[in-house]
Image (cartoon, grey):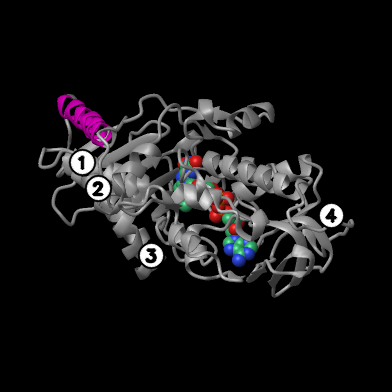
Amino acid sequence: MSSEDFDVAVVGAGAAGIAAALALRDAGLRCVVLEASGRLGGRAFTDTESLGAPFDRGAAWLHDADNNPLTPIALRQGFTLHEEPGRRRRDILLIGDRPATPEEKAAHDAAAEAWEAAAERRAAEGGPDIPLSDAVPRGGFWDATVEHWFGAIISGVEARCDSLRDYVATALVGRNPQVREGLGTLVARQAEGLDVALGTPVNVVRTGGPGGAVELEGPRGRVRARGCVVTVSTGVLAAGAIRFDPALPPAVLDAVARLPQGMVTKVALRAAGADRLDLPDFGRLGRRVEHDRDRPASWICWPFGRDHAIAYIGGEASRELAREGPGAADAFARAELARFFGPARVERAFRPGAAVTRWAEDPLFRGAYSHARVGHAGARAVLRDAAVADGRLRFAGEACHERYAGTVGGAWESGLRAARALAEALASGTGLHAGSKSAALPESKR
Ligand SMILES: Cc1cc2nc3c(=O)[nH]c(=O)nc-3n(C[C@H](O)[C@H](O)[C@H](O)COP(=O)(O)OP(=O)(O)OC[C@H]3O[C@@H](n4cnc5c(N)ncnc54)[C@H](O)[C@@H]3O)c2cc1C
């Protein structure tokens, strides 16, 4: 890091940080992005090495594409969007060791509709917030399966630990295309032309500096700016990886604690030969939850015709596997797949080894995406509106979005919003020194 002055320092080069930096630059402010890791995009990360073709280790879908700020950007820049028909399509839905009949699949879909409708109805009734699991049907043939899907797999947390109000407020709707080149590629591309210092962790943010300046410190040195946007995950904030001096107000700390990170692990296997398990491209596999401790993986096979089969494992199962290490996740995924096709065929069809994501174990993320603890849906607005040190320190990121929390689009909009608020504070000169000089960070990368 250099000790040169900037108007704004942004901490983190994920979707929120990149969006904030673009908006600040457009507002004519001199901005630097300090990113701890050696790459751009944060939880939107397209891995082009592990599987020989793009593999989105984190975000893959442009949720609610018609209202997603990244959709028009993707289209304008020539990215290829692909949308699968049928939101709940399962090419094979397993009951025990046999595939569900079309009638049974229809009953599953009806149970999912009823589940979502019940949650919406209960939230609309008002009253105190309750666990999501208390608002939905229980005991029906498909209810535990549907709850596992919307809870552990989609939200990264079991429904009993999730706020009903927050779940309904942030529920995913609309079209959900994937990006052939990778959603991570799309996000990282937007940082072109920005001043980003990779490999530059921030450990201390001081807001009581001379002239109202913010000072950011890390092993690479110190940066001084008039304002700062912090975009690291609530998991990173809660772990205390960044020390704030003076300490953050209790309301902000409470909001962070009330928005923990849920967990989703992807395990990607690669085909050994031509056997595609009689599944189409984007083939989907799911199975019924058979008992209380049963936590099925959900599968997407051969995305974009590639030779990958990707297991999604969420919530507690994901955390347990994270503790046991990547070998355990690989074995779990193969055992899950063997339920559909038998162990011998799975062994023949796939190469040894797997690409296993490790978002919870990574100290730069500490989870997949946020949910609100029961009773605390309001925490998102608290973090979003927190204007620390006369508005010179703002927070942004997926957890700060009341509608699109847990998504790349939400993170992006949150970054724009924080940038606007900060630019206004700087323009009104709340205790800030004006002007800054031009400077180049060492090893500044795009
Ligand atoms: C497995 C998985 C699947 C997902 N699927 C989807 C999906 O299909 N669609 C969707 O829209 N969303 C999805 N998401 C969620 C989406 O990826 C996130 O909501 C979004 O990318 C978060 O962006 P952000 O900018 O808020 O945070 P981040 O991407 O976490 O960015 C924060 C940045 O801060 C950096 N950082 C951390 N600590 C420090 C420090 N001390 N100093 C400097 N830098 C630091 C990090 O390295 C990171 O680059 C998924 C996430 C995961 C993990």
**Residue denoted by label 4:** 434
Label 3 is placed on what type of residue? Ala
Cβ–Cβ below 8 Å for labels 1 and 3? Answer: no
Q: How far apart, in angstroms, are the residues tagged by discs 1 and 2?
A: 8 Å
Work out how far the residue at label 1 is from the one at label 4, CA to CA, in angstroms: 53 Å
Q: Earlier in the sequence, mark 2 or mark 3?
A: 2
Residue 391 x/y as whole percent = 65, 54
* Residue positioned 75% across, 63% down in the render: 212
Q: How many discs appear? A: 4
Give the quadrant of the N terminus.
bottom right
- Which callout, 2 or 4, points at the residue further toward the start of the chain? 2
Q: Which range of residues does the magenta coloring cover?
A: 103-122
> What secondary structure is found at the residue carrying circle 3?
helix
C-alpha distance separating marks 2 and 3: 29 Å
Residue in view at x 45 percent, y 57 percent? 255
Amino acid type of the residue tagged 4 in the rendering: Ala
